[in-house]
Amino acid sequence: MTTLLPLGHFAPLLVLAAAILGYARPGRRPAHVPLLAEAAALGALVLAVFGALQLVMGAALTTGSGAFLLRLDAASATMTLLVAFVGWVVVRYSRSYLDGEAQEGRFHALMLTALAAVLVLVQSGSMAVLIASFIAIGVVLRQLLLFYSDRAEARRAATKFALVWGAGDLALVLAALALWQAFGTVDVVALGIAAQGGLPLAGHLGAALLVLAAALKTAAFPLHGWLTEVMEAPTPVSAQLHAGIINAGGFLLIRNAELVQASPGALAALVMLGGFTALFGAMVMLTQSAVKTALAWSTVSQMGFMLLQCGLGLWALALLHIVAHSMYKAHAFLASGNAVRAVAGVTRPGPVAVPGLGAVTRAFLLALAIYAVVATSFGAVAGAKSAQALALGAILIFGVAYLVAQGLADAAPRALTQRTALASLAAAVAYFALHVVAGALWGPYLPAPPVPGALEWALIVLALASFGLIAVAQALFPLWAHHPATAGLRVHIANGLYLNAVLDRLIGGLRTTTKA
C-alpha cells in the first residue's frame, strides 16, 4: 500500500503559489513571473509523474476527510499527467506570446489558476470537490475570455460561456443532491459500488443530471456556440480550453462510470446526443475557411464522439480519446500560425482528385473489407471485442474511407491510391492495437461495456447508418458543395444552421455587438 500522500495532490498548490506572484505583479514584463510560471507548471508535471509512479508501486488511494476527498487511481493519474503536460507546454508558449502585453502578469496568474483548478478536478474523489473545481474553472476562464474586454465579440462569448457553464454547475449540484438522497454519500467510489446493486428513482435522476452537466460542459448540441467564439481570447487560452478544460465533462462521466452505466436511459441519451453533435460538428467544420474556427468546430465534433463512446460503455476508449485529442488539439492551436503560412506559401497547388459516386462506393467496400480482416485477426489473438467496440471501429473506418475515395478517383495517381489504401490498413490496425493498450491500462478499473439489449442494438444500427451517410456526404463534398442547387445549403451549414444566432438574440449579444 502507498504510505505517503500522492505527490500529484501537491501539484495544484505549487501552481497556485506561482499564480499569487502573478496577481501581485499584474502589469507588463513583471520581472521573473513568466519564468516562475513555467517553472511551476514544470514542477507540477514532475509531481504528476511521481504520483503515477506511486500508483504503479502501490494501489489506488482516496485521501481527505468528509466531503473533501482526492483520489489516486488509473484515471486520475493519467489525467493529472495529461493536464500537467499540456499546461506546461501552454504556459511555456505564453512566455513569448504575451511578452509586452499590458496585463502580462495577470494573464500568467489566471492561466496558472485555471491549471490548478483542472488539476484538482481530475484528482477529485467526491462530488463536492468536482463541483468546487468546476465552479472555479468557470470563474477563471470567464476572466481569460474577457482578457480583451474592449472587444464586443469577446464579451458576447464570455456571456454565453458563463450561462452554459453555470447551467452545468447547477445540474451538477442537483445531481449531487439526488445522489445523496439515494445513497447518503458523495464519495464517487462509494457511489459506484452502490450503483452496482441497482438505482432507485433518485439515483436515475442523479445519473440523468450528470449526463446533462457533462453535455453542457462539453459544448454539446445545441448549446455549442460559445466554444466556436472564444477566438477573441489569446491563443494560449484557446489551446488550454480546447486541449484541456473542454475534456472535463468527459472526465466527469468517466469518474462516475459505474453510476452512469447503471442507467440505460443515461447511456441512450449519451449515444443520441453525442452522435448527433459529432455529425453536426463535422459537417460544419468542412465549410469553415478560418483555421481556428475549423479547429473549434472540430472540437465540438470530437467532444460529441467522446460522449458517444461513453454512451456505448467504452470507457477506456473514451479516456484514450481524451488523451489523444488533448495532444492533437494543443499542437493544432499553438501551431495554427505555421499552418496558415505553409498554405499561403503554396503558390502552385497540385491537382485535386475528386471522387465520383462509383469511387466512393468502392472505397467504402475496400475500407470495410480491410477492417473485417484486421478485426478477425485481432479477435483471434486478443479475444473477441464487444459489439459496441466493433461498431465504433466501423465508424472510424468510415472516416478513413473518405481518404480512400480520393485515392480511387479517376484523376488520382497510383501513388495516392496506394497511400490511401495503406492509410485505411494502418487506421484499422491502430484502432485495435490502441484498444488493447487502453484495455490493459484502464480496463481493469472501469466497467466493461454492457451486453447490448434491443435498445442498445437499435442505437448501434442508427449510429452506423448516420455516420455512414455523413461519411458519404463528406467524400462527395467537392461535388455537391459548389453545385448551384446546394449553394444555399452550404451557407446554412457554414453558419451552424443559425442556432448560435438564436442564442445571441436570447442573451442580447447582437445588440451589444451593434452598439460597439
Image (spheres, helix red, strand yellow):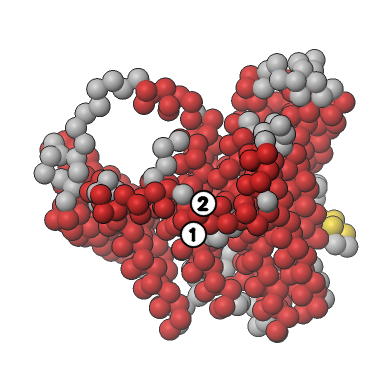
Q: Are marks 1 and 2 in contact (CB under 8 Å)?
A: yes
Side (left or right) of 252 relative to 461: right
Q: Would residue 357 be seen by someone viewing this image from the given angle?
A: yes
**Residue at 81% across / 36% down in the picture?**
16
Q: CA distance from mark 1 to mark 2?
A: 7 Å
The amino acid type of the residue labelled 2 equals: Val
Residue 472 x %, y %: 27, 57
**Residue at 35% across / 54% down in the picture?**
489
Toward the viewer: 160 or 18?
A: 160
Residue 495 x %, y %: 46, 49
Residue occupied by mark 1: 277
Circle 1 SS class: helix
Circle 2 SS class: helix
**Residue at 57% across / 78% down in the picture?**
265
Dot 1 or dot 2, earlier in sequence: 1
Locate the N terminus by quadrant. bottom right
**Residue at 48% across / 26% down in the picture?**
337
Residue 496 x %, y %: 47, 52
> In the picture shown, does residue 220 fall above or below 9?
below
Residue occupied by mark 2: 300
